[in-house]
Every structure is written in C-alpha cells, then in structure tokens.
Amino acid sequence: MDTEAGILAYDTHSSDIEPGSSVELVIHPDDFGIDENESGAMIVQAREFRGDATVLMIALPSGATLRCRQDSHCAITSGRRVDLILNRPGPFAAFSV
C-alpha cells in the first residue's frame, strides 16, 4: 500500500476489503525509526521523555501525526526534518474505513 510513510505491506484478515479501497492501518510507536534529514518530508512536532524512551510526534506532509518511540538518549529536537525508517518486520493490520 502506498502511504505518506512509504510503501507498506498489510494484511486485512478479511475478504471484504477490495483492492484500491481506503483502509486504516494499525501503527505502533516502535514500527518506525527516525533518520534526521534536512530535506526530509516529515517534521518533529514534539518530543516526550519517558525514562527508558523518548517518544517523538512526527507530522506527515498531510498534517497527520505518528508517535515514534526512540532510545532515551535520542537527541533529535522539535522542528527538525526527518525521514521514517520502517522497523516492523511483518505486514500492518488493515481495517476498512
């Protein structure tokens, strides 16, 4: 599936979703890594330190946001441009909209 976050594999576990249909994907904070890139399409909106991790709120070009959990020593600050790196080994769960 072609998304703002890249081309992502998905599994519907259902036969009622037809090719080309709009779906929602279940995305977890550990599914993506972050690569700081001055020409990146996404922007770090906020960061939250949680002791053992830092959670970055990433704004996609559409304005939608993703939470991405990083190591606690992550030094990427709000306002920085980034790219997403897919960490998830398998397909995302997809549900009809």
Image (spheres, rainbow, N blue to C red):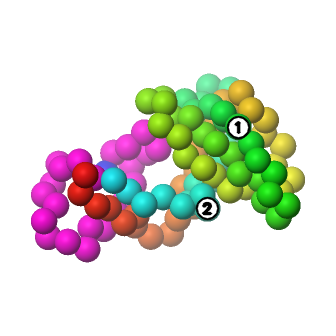
The answer, for residue 47, to whether it is visible in the render is yes
Where residue 76 appears, as percent x and y from the top left, is 78, 40
Q: Which residues are magenta?
A: 2-23
User: How many numbered callouts?
Assistant: 2
Q: Amino acid at mark 2?
A: Asp
x, y (%) of residue 85? Answer: 58, 50
Q: Is residue 71 visible?
A: no
User: In this image, 83 relative to 2: left or right?
Assistant: right
**Which residue is the site of mark 2?**
30
Say above or below: 7 vs 91.
above
Judging by the rendered image, the residue that carries numbered circle 1 is 46
The answer to whether residue 5 is magenta is: yes
Picture residue at 14% right of the left edge, 70% below the top: 15
* 97 shown above or below 12: above
Which image quadrant is residue 4 in? top left
Residue type beneath disc 1: Ala
- Image-based side of 35 in relation to 26, left or right: right
At x 55%, y 30%, the residue is 41
* For residue 78, above or below residue 25: above
- Cα separation, mark 1 vs mark 2, equals 17 Å
Whether 11 is among the magenta residues is yes
Main secondary structure type of the part rendered in magenta: loop
Query: Is 94 above or below relative to 47?
Result: below
Q: Give whichever of discs 1 and 2 has the lower sequence position.
A: 2
- Horizontal and vertical percent for residue 84? 58, 45
Do the residues under discs 1 and 2 have CB atoms within 8 angstroms? no
